[in-house]
Amino acid sequence: MPTSDLLRKLGQYLPPDEVALVERAYQYAERAHAGQTRKSGEPYITHPLAVAGILAGWQLDAQALAAALLHDVLEDTPANKEELTREFDSVVADLVDAVSKLNQLDFSSREEAQAETFSKMVLAMARDVRVILIKLADRFHNMQTLGAMSLASRRRIARETCDIYAPIAQRLGLYALRQGLLDLSFKYLNPYRHRVLGSTIENIRTARSDTVDGMLSLLRERLAQQPQLKAEVSARERTVYSVYNKMREKHLSLQQVMESYGVLVLADSRNDCYAALGVLHEIYKPLPGRFKDYIAIPKANGYQALHTTLFGPDSMPIDVHICTHDMNLIAENGVAAYWMYRSGSDLAHLAEAQQNTHRWLKGLLEMQTEGGDSREFVENIKRDLFPEEIYVFTPKGRIMVLPRGATVLDFAYSIHTDVGNHCTGARIDHEIMPPRTVLKNGRQVEVLTDTDARPMPAWLSFVVTGKARSAIRNYLKGQQQQAAAALGERLLKHALAIFELNAEKITPEQWRSLAETQGVKTVIDLYTDIGTGKRLPFMVAQTFSKRLDSEPPLPTQRRGRVSQLRDIVAKTFSQKRVEGLQLHDSDSGVLRYAPCCRPLPNDPIIGWFRQGQGLEVHIRDCATLKQRAATQSGEWIEMTWPDTPQVLFLSEVRSWAPDRQGLLADQAGAIAQAGANILQVNIERPQGQALSAMLFQIEVRDRQHLADVLRGLRRVVGVKRVQRVKA
């Protein structure tokens, strides 16, 4: 778009002083990008000018248009944000900064850079929706000129557009832009299919043009016969991508997809929409179950229309959308209609749609705050951008929009994180149902909570919304960090005792000094690092000992890993100078019970601590641990079990017996009778041997409980031998 055309277009809806601001931004951008060209060879300024032209079509304000013209100067020129603030204002500078990529940061991968860029953009668009409008316009023009890029770049950018930007455009109600982005993405991801389908679709349209024209004429004539009804009728043309997507999702042939016609009816008022629906149902019979009323219950992005499917000429289906001119404006332009929509009967509805968008953006901000790294955040965003939605009601009649497949828990987290964290179920249409229940359209849902309820890892297996997944992960991560800090504190105090240092007598100033020497902010951070295996407790204790100017010679139990391990095996804990570290039930989430020997309560145990691996608990006579100690660096830690463990432990049992009918059932019954839970069974039938082996993976409380299981198995008829598997 030439500069003169843009300024003339702006003059139709902006006052002269604001047009002058946009013109000044253009002049600044032209100077900043002087000498720069795009991959196509065009002057670089053509790109920001085209982006501003798209925003002018939405009648955005002068600040947004100025930011669109300047959106690449921070990334591609020496200009900085402070200079933009001086030249224009802080709002324009903030908009430009929010859209800019994060080139100045050092990322480990392109994916991480893209995730960080998007994360920053979400943070800004939660404050100002114009950020995403500028970014979407920027992406649309880039897609229009993508042919100049390399093949790899075209595919990467097209995939990102399809996965992130097109769904966001849909969520914001920008249907026209969404269709354009998807069609361009399809063109570059599947160029051959796009070319062949596009040609075939055009041939089909030409061949049936007379039939379509006749059907449209009939509809117009019958609607015009209603004196109080004013309505316009036009054909809705499908894009190449929409045809391809319908073929893929519904497993239809091209001919089957193209068998239906698309019709748009624009009426003057809501009442006219329903009146037009009645007229159409008199002309052609409606297909049962295909009517949807999005006027009474709008979509979350503000979309409103009546959808119906009719038996058309020669029984060909006609997909009809009926809406007012104002509704169509919102349908095409979504949140951007806020700047275009000066008056009308649906102004209040548009304000409600704006509020829905703000709530969605606020939800993204909460998800970003609660979630993990940026890549996890982007994956959660993708989960939330579902094309299909369901509508459920709160007891007070408020409509809640959720993705199809959402559960009671997703509903609870959509209300508030605390409600989700304490959810125990829900009353669905007055019937109590569990948290994992999948919700259906039109149900009334009342969440049930309990202050003692807490998120569990199993919840992640059935929730579908990004907000729910992010909140659950954040809670579990916090719990794990607390457990890691508690374990790290006990490990460090245990290591300090080896150097004859009493942790209780160490002053707060000395603890802070220790944290500083380890490069962490607080002692809690130091404990957490130790508990998660990032630091070795003995090395931290040794460093601390040196700082306190008390460097006793290394205790004899540290003189060599192999001989040291032999000493542990040969001696009892009572012969040691330092008592064993006692395990806690809460440690289960941050330490690992060695799969080679699978220790159980009452087994004599030691811990093997390796940097980056954390603490692994072994039986003291574990052969695997002896081999590791001889070849790998690490620390051993004497350990004892809690008096009454409250968790179950994994163990393996192998039995040998001649094969017979019902043998597996009898052994499973014996295990169940002993009160143990079977997780997995493997049956081995070696050729040429008389006995078959069965390997049971079970959960038990302790070594005594395992002994009960072994005794029960030995009483099974035919069982010759039973053995606990340790390696």
Image: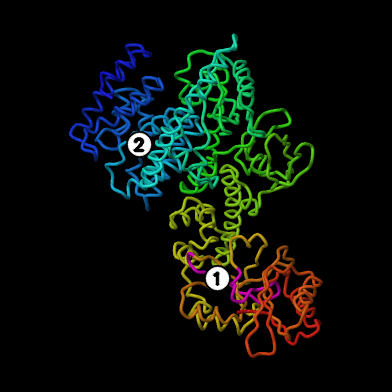
- Mark identifier at residue 418: none
From the viewer's perspective, tell me whether residue 659 is left or right of residue 569.
right
Q: Amino acid at mark 1?
A: Ile
From the viewer's perspective, tell me whether residue 76 is left or right of residue 587.
left
Quadrant where the C terminus sits is bottom right
Q: How is the image coloured?
A: rainbow
Percent position of residue 174, x then y: 47, 30
Percent position of residue 503, x then y: 57, 61
Q: State how far apart marks 1 and 2 are (Cα).
A: 54 Å
Dot 1: within a 10 Å radius of its alpha carbon, few (fewer than 14), some, or many (20 or more) residues? many
Q: Quadrant of residue 495?
A: bottom right
Whether the residues at callouts 1 and 2 have beta carbons within 8 Å, the answer is: no
- Is residue 601 a member of the stretch shown in magenta? yes
Q: Amino acid at mark 2?
A: Ser
Percent position of residue 430, x then y: 79, 37
Name the residue located 60 percent from the left edge and 82 percent from the top edge: 569
Residue stretch in magenta: 593-612
Q: Residue furthest left?
A: 35
Quadrant where the N terminus sits is top left
Query: Can the viewer see residue 634 in this picture?
Result: yes
| First in sequence: mark 1 vs mark 2 | 2
Image: 394 above or below 570: above
From the viewer's perspective, tell me whether residue 70 is left or right of residue 481.
left
Image: 388 above or below 697: above
Name the residue located 53 percent from the left edge and 45 percent from the top edge: 252
- Mark identifier at residue 100: 2
Q: Quadrant of residue 370?
A: top right
- Mark identifier at residue 498: 1
Please, what secondary structure does the residue beneath circle 2 have?
loop
Pick the residue in front: 552 or 639.
639
From the viewer's perspective, tell me whether residue 615 is left or right of residue 34.
right
Dot 2: within a 10 Å radius of its alpha carbon, few (fewer than 14), some, or many (20 or more) residues? many
